[in-house]
Each structure stands twice: as C-alpha cells, then as structure tokens.
Image (cartoon, rainbow, N blue to C red):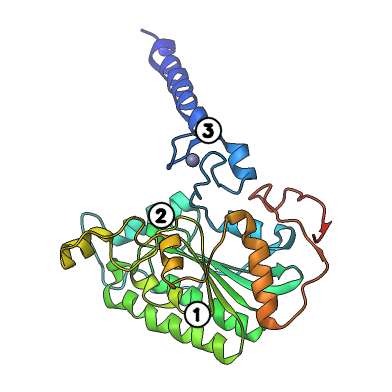
Amino acid sequence: MNWITNFVRPRIKSLMAGRAAETPENLWKKCPSCGEMIFHRDLEAAQNVCPQCNHHLRIGPAERFAAIFDAGVYEELPQPEVPADPLHFRDERRYTDRLKDARHKTGRNEALAAARGTLDGTPVMVAVQPFDFLGGSLGMGVGEALVRAMQAAVAERRPFILFSSSGGARMQEGILSLMQMPRVTIGVDMLREAKLPYIVVLTDPTTGGVSASYAMLGDIHIAEPGALIGFAGQRVIEQTIRERLPEGFQRAEYLLDHGMVDMVVHRHDLRATLSRVAHLMLKKPRPKTRQAPAIVSANPTKPNPPARAAS
Ligand SMILES: [Zn+2]
C-alpha cells in the first residue's frame, strides 16, 4: 500500500466519475412533456420552449429579463431586509435550513426578482417569481420586495409587469405570509391610483394565495400556453364536490375559454405583446424601429442580434 493507491487513485476516480455524471445532464435537457432530448443551446435559443412539442419549460428571472428588456439590459432592485424565520418554524427540517438550501441552489436571496429597464424604449418595471426558490412561495421577503418594486414603479412612472409563478403562501411564515396578500393588493391599488398599467403574465404554475390575490388583479391577464393556473389543486376540488373535472381544467387555454384570462401568448410573441399592450394602455405610440427580442441568450453580457425595423 502506498499513497498512490490510497490517495491518488481514488481522487482521480472520483474526478472522472463526477465529470462523467455531469456532462450529459448539462448539455442535454429532457422535455418534461414529450421526453425529447434537446441540446442546451437549441433550448436556450428557443427561450426554453420545446422545438418538438411547444411545451413551455419553466424559466427564471435571468431568462425573463434577458428576453423582455431592450437588448437584455436591466438593473435589478436590491432585495429588502425582512425578519428571518419569526415563528422559529420547524417541520422535518428547520425553515432556516430550507431557506439556506434554496439560496445556495438558486443564488438568489428570495423568491422574487424585480428589475427596471426599457421595453421598446419605454421605461418599465418587471418582477419575476422564480418557482425553483421554495416553490415561488409568497413570504414576507417576497411581499416586501413586490411592494417596494411597485412603489418604485409609481415614483418613476413605470408600468408594472409581473411574471407570476407560485405554489401559494409560504406556510412556514404562517399568518405573516397570508398578510402579504392584502399588502401586495394595496401595492396594486397604488399603481391603479397612479394610472399606471399593471400587467400580469401567469406562468406555470400560479396557484394558491398568489392566484387568490395580486396575480388575478391585473389590468390585463396574459397566460403562457399550458400553464397551470388555479387556487386549489384538481384532486382537492374533485374530492370536495365529488365530481370529475373536465379535460384541461385549470390550464391557460381553459381559463381563456371561460373568461378568466385575456390572452394566451406563446413565449416567442410575449415581448411584442407586452410592448403593444403597455403602449396601448399608456396611449403612447410604439417606436417604428424596434429591438429584436433577446432570445439568443439568458446571459446579458452576450451580444444580441442587431436591431431591425418593425414589420
Ligand atoms: Zn417537448
């Protein structure tokens, strides 16, 4: 026995094993709808829409901001400080540990990111709820960040665009999380009083307390195709009313048919639609020359295709 067999070999082995396990997973992504393996660059170029079946995969703030703002340029608002774990909540694990994990996994401080930038030259405020941060749950941090972003939008006279995605209120904060529903609703009222557009894009999934409050209070509701939107889950409703629910229940298209949303818009048309709606509501003409959507990359430092004339 020497240090080569005891130390060097296992290290090389673990290095090789780690790399082998990492590569295919990072380069290819499986579409959760049709199972097609898609090369990561193709998926990125298609704004995370499956080229095979058109399934809209869930995306985070970085991808949203890059796709919506002119040339993918934006300034993120700082995350406000809120009391951490006021109830000292613990289930199988401590709430503080869950928070720490979510922060480590996502590189974000909370389940909300807000940024200011321009959309076809018009200043706008965009807020995104990342679902991968504790299920996009609405806690004090999210509520506070939303209210601050809405206040900033009012002060700077910017339309507010929200990309909602949430499993509902954050149970670990009890009543304090539920209080965020009326708080953010007051924020929406402030936008309304200032006569600023409040546009909600409902993305997969928007459920629970978020759909029961500010996500359903928009001036215009746009949904992404196939998005799950509802309050209680399908199974819970079926058990309560003892009836089978119709096909496609709680999906964006069903909600459109029943008047709950105004539009179902493909992700590739979202930027143009948001710009049109925002300019229409502001009674402001859209510029003739528009920036091409930054669908190439979620990385803001990467150059975007050159601007082209509007068709
Ligand atoms: Zn697919």
CB under 8 Å between discs 2 and 1: no
Outermost residue on the bottom side: it is 193
**Amino acid of disc 3:** Trp
Q: Which residue occupies 69% across, 82% down?
A: 282
- Of mark 3 and mark 1, the one earlier in the sequence is 3
- Of mark 2 and mark 1, the one earlier in the sequence is 2
- Judged by depth in the image, the label closer to the viewer, 2 or 1, is 1
Q: Badge 3: how crowded within 10 Å, few (<14), some, or many (20+)?
A: some
Q: Is 137 positioned to the left or the right of 305 in the image?
A: left
| Residue 149 x, y percent position in the rendering | 56, 76
Q: Badge 1: how crowded within 10 Å, few (<14), some, or many (20+)?
A: some
Q: Badge 2: how crowded within 10 Å, few (<14), some, or many (20+)?
A: some
Query: Quick check: is the Cβ at mark 2 less than 8 Å away from ligand 1?
Result: no
Q: Which mark is residue 147?
A: 1
Name the quarter where the N terminus is drawn. Answer: top left
Q: Which residue is mark 2?
A: 102
Between the residue at mark 2 and the residue at mark 1, the CA separation in whole angstroms equals 22 Å
Q: Is 274 positioned to the left or the right of 8 in the image?
A: right
| Residue 42 x, y percent position in the rendering | 62, 38
Q: Which mark is residue 28?
A: 3
Asked if residue 116 can be seen in this view, the reply is: no
Asked if residue 273 can be seen in this view, the reply is: yes
- Judged by depth in the image, the label closer to the viewer, 3 or 1, is 3
